[in-house]
Amino acid sequence: MSEGTADRQLRARARAVIPGGMYGHQAAPGAAYPQFMRGGRGARVWDVDGNEYVDLMCSYGPVVLGHQHPEVEAAARAQASIGDCMNSPGAVLVDLAELLVQTVRHADWAIFAKNGTDATTMCCTIARAQTGRSKILVAKGAYHGAAPWCTPAPAGVTTADHANLGRYTFNDLASVRQAAAGAGDDLAGVLVSPFKHDAGYDQELVDPAFARGLRELCDSTGAALILDDVRCGFRLHLGSSWEPVGVDPDLSAWSKAIANGRALAAVLGHDAFRDGAKRVFVTGSFWFSAVPMAAAVATIGALREENAIEKMHRQGEALRDGILDQARSWDLAVNYTGPPVMPYLTFAGDTGHELAGVFAAQALRGGAYLHPRHNWFVSAAMTGDDLALVLEATDQAFAAVRKHLGQ
Ligand SMILES: Cc1ncc(COP(=O)(O)O)c(C=O)c1O
């Protein structure tokens, strides 16, 4: 843990050469946490001091099959031995685009990038190019990336960066209609996440009537329905996360889990938006790199062959049931929200996350790496032993909360 020598030494060196010691969500989420990691395998990770944890953060989503998945790693190694960065893409770009178009119902085409922010930003650009309009509606409090138009932090951001955004409330169709009316005839798109997963708040599943209402509004106005599937994609469903809801977007943004931890993002789109996608200039020095694409082809194959999403779901349900039983036995009022594979735990009345911090720090000491202010991620690599270890750790974590409350 953070008291470890190697972590302490690295933090001291980082403070001198990294602004603030670490940036963004890579900063350790509490004093008890290690800042630097050494490796991972399956559902376990090790920090630089050799402490082992069951990983319930999965790098904030990318690791879906578990760390060092053999088939994914073999595919990445095979591609790396041929070439990765080669002036132009490898054949694997077409293989992957075809596979995604077959796998995701609304998709007729794909464009690749590196990070989720690339993909959400590109969706907005394509929506604007296609419609010739400028306004994009986003849900209040939703996270769509770290570019100036969407970062939650005000530093360095100008009002002009937000000038073409309108705001609505997730699951509140009337608020979307009002924001759309505000955009008038300049509405280019509505950006939405598959469910409400704003960091630090209880999560909220989508009301299917809300999703259908967005689809109708976009159909009637000609605006693009844009699904931000960066966090949920291929963890909830092997296809777009709204396929089970019965609503298809026009454009969708992907990253995180699509290559089981390799740097890759994608925009998938319907034919109706192909022309806009052809006209925008989107590129990046590493956007054609072949190794992550080979990893993505293997990841999608393994997700299907291993029935991984169903497996994750079952483990997620067992985790939820175990944690809720423990909360009851410690007589602690909690909210456990979101899909079982992406849960989030809060304590009643704990608005400052004090109890969540006590819980997470003790869980970490017991060998379960979870987060006090962000949803967790279950991977398909989680075994019965991993789950048992997590539940042992969370039981002690509830005990620590009880003690903290002084009862
Ligand atoms: C829903 C959502 N959209 C976009 C992003 C941005 O992705 P990235 O950090 O890869 O740029 C994230 C990252 O957490 C996300 O959760």
Image (spheres, grey):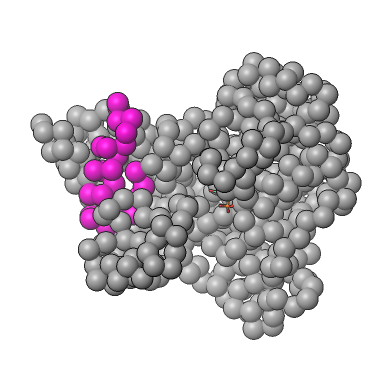
Vertically, is 185 above or below 264?
above
Q: Position of residue 251 (x, y in %)?
A: 74, 42
Is residue 246 in view from this perspective?
no
Q: Which residues are magenta?
A: 348-372
Is residue 314 located in the magenta-colored stretch of the structure? no
Residue sitting at x 60%, y 63% = 263
Residue depicted at x 19% and y 46%: 396
Q: How many marks?
A: 0
**Farthest residue in the left direction?**
407
Looking at the image, residue 106 sits to the left or right of residue 77; the answer is right
Q: Which residue is drawn at the image coordinates 62% and 25% (left, top)?
A: 168
Image position, residue 37 (x, y; %): 38, 67
Q: Is residue 247 above or below residue 210?
A: below
Quadrant of residue 259 within the rendered picture? bottom right
Nearest to the observer: residue 330 or residue 180:
180
Q: Nearer the viewer, residue 70 or 89?
A: 89
Q: Is residue 370 part of the magenta span, yes or no?
A: yes
Q: Residue furthest bottom?
A: 81
Q: Is residue 84 above or below residue 7?
A: below
Q: Position of residue 101 (x, y in %)?
A: 76, 52
